[in-house]
Image: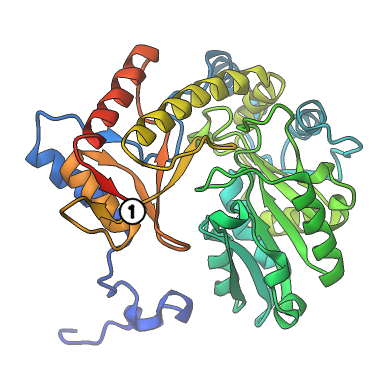
Amino acid sequence: MPGKKNYIQELFSERLGGNSFGKDTKIYKFEKIKRAKRSTMEANPTKELFDLGVGEPDEMAFPDVIKTLQLEAEKPENRGYTDNGIQEFKDAAVKYMENVFGVKGLDAEKNVNHTIGSKPALAMLPSIFINPGDITLITVPGYPVMGTHTQYLGGEVVHLPLTKENNFLPDLNSISQDVAKRAKLLYINYPNNPTGANATRSFYEEVVEFAKKNDVVVIQDAAYAALNFDEKLTSFLSVPGAMDVGVELHSLSKSYNMTGWRIAFVVGNELIVKGVAHVKDNIDSGQFAAIQKAAVYALEHPEITKAILNKYRRRLSNLVEALNSAGFDAHMSGGSFFLYVEAPKGIKGGKRFKTGEEFSQYLIKEMMISTVPWDDVGHFIRFSATFAAKGVIEETRIINGIKSRLSSVEFEF
């Protein structure tokens, strides 16, 4: 009927903004970056844009992983639902945790469950524990998914700032008694996105102590755990008491160039894993068995990750040199494929930058270098080593191009 009120607009839940859903005119930073890149490329069609904002691998999965998927996809026995995962994948995850991280004594039946990427697991976890009024503690800057779903359920999110002065580790002593008492979940992510910081063993021990003292469940998002530049890889679960209080989420997306494949696993405390399996049963029917079997091959060949890690180590160290030659204070990442660098205050005798976002936009529009800004705790920008380049010669050319453009002006810090 003409003129009839749009009842669908009135039915949106309050968690999505109620009847204001879709009317927000605010442009979020990733959309701003996309628009700036588009307009800059249109205005400069003959000039190359260096995209250091991409947060996923620039290469495909290794050939033998792809070949395994092809072979397994042709088998009739792999066609059906897998629900909470095939046994081969769980077994491979247990062996991987022992061989790569030294975590022993895991039971594939009780301590592991596959997920369709780690993002869905982060979305499911609040459904296991959060009631209205409960608190999830989340490090910031960081990945917001678990916080978003906490708020969907009527919970509250308390941010723990990651400061340069504290080596980008949260200060657990700063959490008030009232907040700690109401907290159900503590989310940490190391190696960290976006800071590239590593957690120390002593920090993990402090986390376990905090969790036991305050009855808090720990979720360690270990998406970049194998992309760690320390000689010895450390798992949160290797710390005494960690299995009593938490789980780790391991993903093959970044460490095996399998981002679009959507395969990960949750590992650790039996009750938490059981809770994930229960919620997951009501959300999905499991990842395609052929993908899980290809992931088994990957987990059995950690040398693949070592080859990928060597590439990122080379690229990041060269990026550090390029940035520092232009006056930045860049330091080699502890892990991941990111560099997290303070934005300059301005250009000598010229433009001023009040935020990291302002500087990021300047880099795109004036220098055709794309980055991601973070203004949650200080003014920083994130450079990624996953820019598209085939081979060392090509990546060296790109980094030299970035160095040349950045050095064309004098920044003030």
Which one is in front, 34 or 130?
Answer: 34
Question: As rendered, which of 280 and 372 lies closer to the eye?
Answer: 372
Q: Is residue 373 left or right of residue 64?
A: left
Q: Mark 1 points at which residue?
A: 30
- Relative image position of residue 63 (x, y in whole percent): 52, 14
Q: Foreground residue, 114 or 29?
A: 29
> Measuring 58% from the left and 47% from the top, which residue is drawn there?
192
Q: Where is residue 119 in the image (x, y as percent from the top left)?
A: 56, 50
Farthest residue toward the front?
A: 349
Q: State the SS at label 1.
A: helix
Residue 261 in view of the camera: yes
- Residue under the image location 70 percent in, 63 percent down: 186
Residue 282, visible in the rendered structure: no
Up-down relation of residue 201 to residue 125 (above or below): above
Counting from the top left corner in percent of width and height, residue 237 is at 81, 45
Task: State the residue in front, 325 or 34.
Answer: 325
Residue 252 % position (x, y): 60, 33
**Label 1: how many residues lie within 10 Å, few (<14), some (14-19) or many (20+)?**
few
Asked which quadrant contains residue 197, the reply is: top right
